[in-house]
Amino acid sequence: MTDIALLGFGRIAQVHAKAIASGNLPINVRAVADANPDARAAAAQLGAKTFESVDELLSAGLELDAALVASSTPFHVEHTTLALDAGLHVLCEKPLSEDVKEVRHLTALAAEKGLVLRTAFNRRFDPLFRDLKARIGTETGPVRSVHIISRDPFPPPPGYPRSAGSMLRDMTIHDFDTARYLVDDDIVAVTARGTGTFDTDALAVGDTDTVFLILEMARGTLIGIDNCRATSYGFDQRIEVHGEAGTLHAGNEALPQATRIGAGGFTTPRLVDFFPTRYAQSYIDQLSSFGNAIAAAKAGAAPDDIAADGRDALQALQAALAGWRSIVEGRRVTLEEVV
């Protein structure tokens, strides 16, 4: 059994807690730290000990194996550092940091202490995307281009852009990582354009709500990313991989699955509501992988799986920062410029 602490108990931490429970994983949530009393009350229902701060939790003398950092973005570096210094393995929500130097520092700190440090790019574990990746090459031949579509069903709540960072660092960062994961290659340059037409909260802090990006990969593949903060029809998640021998398409999940055909034509079901439903299995599999990595580390072995490590976190952040610079400056930006 792996004993973990949840650092933060907002929406994403509760998604992880649900995954632990529904996946019947050998992971025990021993403690939760959150300054919000309502969040602590919700956490107490898990049977976990609750604390007002991370410092208080880590000084309580609990026997813990790991920490899941699910606090708001500005606290990721602080809480990850505290957990690593306490000798805990860490799974941190994205982004690991908003500063490339801090990502490098945390990666080095974890390596120095012999601890597992992962970033929660859960879409690597999505069954549809894993199946797609397994078929790339054998069914597509050499890949010529990839198109990733990710559109949220509604804008984030008021105040969210201020705490989570820009759209590229908060939303598109998943797609940067997915792009690298699918084609096993690094991003070398980003060209991006963004507009803001409806999310007034994002516009108030100079952010965008709709972006198009072109990624240039090291081996020459072009990958397009199409993101929007809202749709009228649900959580839109699609990937197309085009190759010399054929094209693969990973489509959306819908509820119900069946499309009705009648006298009035085709009736397609509505897409699932949002990411906790669409990616439910990926959260379970990601946590299972994290537990396995901890067990491997205790045995002195290196984990062998698809999880995102510090280098993956660094590349995704560099791509996000390069993309924002491209939007602001109206030009192609290489990742070498983001140091």
Image (spheres, grey):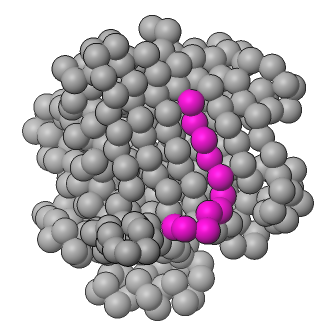
182 vs 124: above or below: above
Q: Residue at x 49, y 9 (%)?
A: 220
x, y percentage for residue 301?
14, 31
Residue 22 in which image quadrant: bottom left
Q: Is residue 327 left or right of residue 58?
A: right
Say which quadrant the N terminus sits in: bottom left
The residue stretch that appears in magenta: 224-234
Q: Nearer the viewer, residue 205 or 136?
A: 136
264 vs 86: above or below: below
Question: Magenta span has 233?
Answer: yes
Asked whether the viewer can see residue 25, the reply is yes
x, y percentage for residue 112?
38, 29
Residue 203 in which image quadrant: bottom right
Q: Residue at x 67, y 15 (%)?
A: 334
x, y percentage for residue 176?
52, 35
Total labels: the figure holds 0
Q: Residue at x 72, y 30 (%)?
A: 192
Q: Nearer the viewer, residue 212 or 306?
A: 212
Question: Magenta span has 251?
Answer: no
Q: Residue furthest front?
A: 263
Q: Is residue 332 left or right of residue 231?
A: right
